[in-house]
Amino acid sequence: MSTEKSYGLGYFVKGAIAGGVCCSVTHGALCPVDVVKTRIQLDPIKYNKGMIGGFKQVIAEEGMKGLATGLGPTCVGYFVQGWFKFGGVEFFKISASQKLGEESAWANRTLIYLAAAACAEFIADIFLCPLEATRIKLVSNPQYADGLISAFPKIIKDQGVKNGFYAGFGPILFKQIPYTMAKFAVQGWAAEKIAVASGTDMKTASDSKKLTISLSSGVVAGVAAAIISHPADTLLSMINKSPTAGGTGSIASRLINLSKETGLKKLCLTGLGARCVMIGSLTAGQFGIFDIVMKLTGAEKFHFTDPKAKAH
């Protein structure tokens, strides 16, 4: 699609809506996996039987409702995050492409993906962080509150806004920005490779073919992004578990203490299997749902175009 096409506010709002829906639906659907993954990260001694064993332990102790712990802040938080992330990526990607021109944008598309994802994710994390802190608080201690509405004021009362909601802002940036950069850049790369390997022309392909490529490339991107961001995800879970986790100093010093206490191997590997399953499925679902919702809104999704192939 030509970068000369006009993209107005309506297009970006549709992209934001599609992003909010795809992130909220996928994270909400995978909430049980996230509960088990977080428990493994926070208490690996107790939850030491892998993902399947972790499911059985949670159900045995808390019933099926235990797997839905933190569902409220998960759905709300990731709708807000998806709104700014997917909508922001579309905005920054298209803005950069239009300034550079079609030929230069095509040659530098990976760099554009990376920069657009980083900028969009930073903005999204400002809004996500309080809700993610609330989710982790509820998952680590199901007795803390009944849900999002009751947990929010309790966290403010107990810890204040900064320590209660933004103690994990550093880790969430460290986790989410590399994750999102890998997610969009790898998905774009993988989609191109799959299209070439299958002999698919994305300009003329059927909707089902496009959806298949979105899902397949999403799995590849999700696994890559999960591996890259996992150490920060573990630290985020730990620092939000308790106000004294890692000591009582600054957030930076607490994170350093937690890293030393845990060790690089455990930071990188504890709960990684569950997270790869979760993020691989989640990312595939997100790109698939995003494309579906964009089509339902009548938006013609932006794609980088090779000028040489277009000329032929």
Image (cartoon, rainbow, N blue to C red):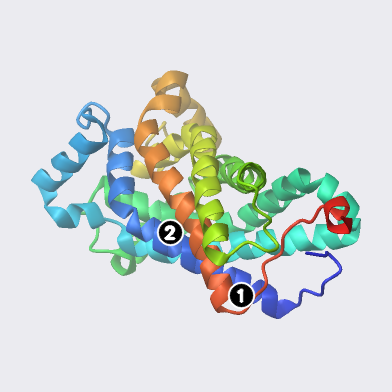
Q: What amino acid does circle 2 point to? A: Leu
Q: Is residue 309 found left or right of 259 in the rendered image?
A: right
Point out residue 168 in the picture as x, y percentages from the top left corner.
Answer: 48, 45
The N terminus: image quadrant: bottom right
Image location of residue 84, percent across then percent down: 60, 64
Q: Position of residue 58 (x, y in %)?
A: 17, 44
In the depicted structure, whether residue 277 falls above or below residue 302 = above
Depth check: 187 or 133 in front? Answer: 187
| Residue nearest the viewer, comparing 16 with 167 | 16
Q: Residue at x 21, y 29 (%)?
A: 49
Q: Nearer the viewer, residue 288 or 144?
A: 288
Q: Name the element at disc 2.
A: helix
In this orientation, does residue 15 appear? yes
In-front residue for pair 66/255 = 66
As helix, strand or loop, the secondary structure at mark 1 comes to: helix
Say which mark, if any, is on residue 131.
Answer: 2
Label 1 environment density (alpha carbons within 10 Å; few <14, some 14–19, many ≥20): many
Please tell me whether mark 1 or mark 2 is closer to you in this view.
1
Residue 152 % position (x, y): 37, 64
Could you tell me the amino acid type at mark 1?
Lys
Q: Quadrant of the C terminus?
A: bottom right
Which residue is found at the position 82% from the left and 50% from the top? 106
What residue did someone put label 1 on?
A: 14
Q: Residue at x 59, y 69 (%)?
A: 16
Residue 265 in the figure: left or right of residue 99: left
> Which numbered circle lies on residue 128?
none
52 left or right of 164 in image: left
Q: Real-space Cα distance between discs 1 and 2?
A: 23 Å
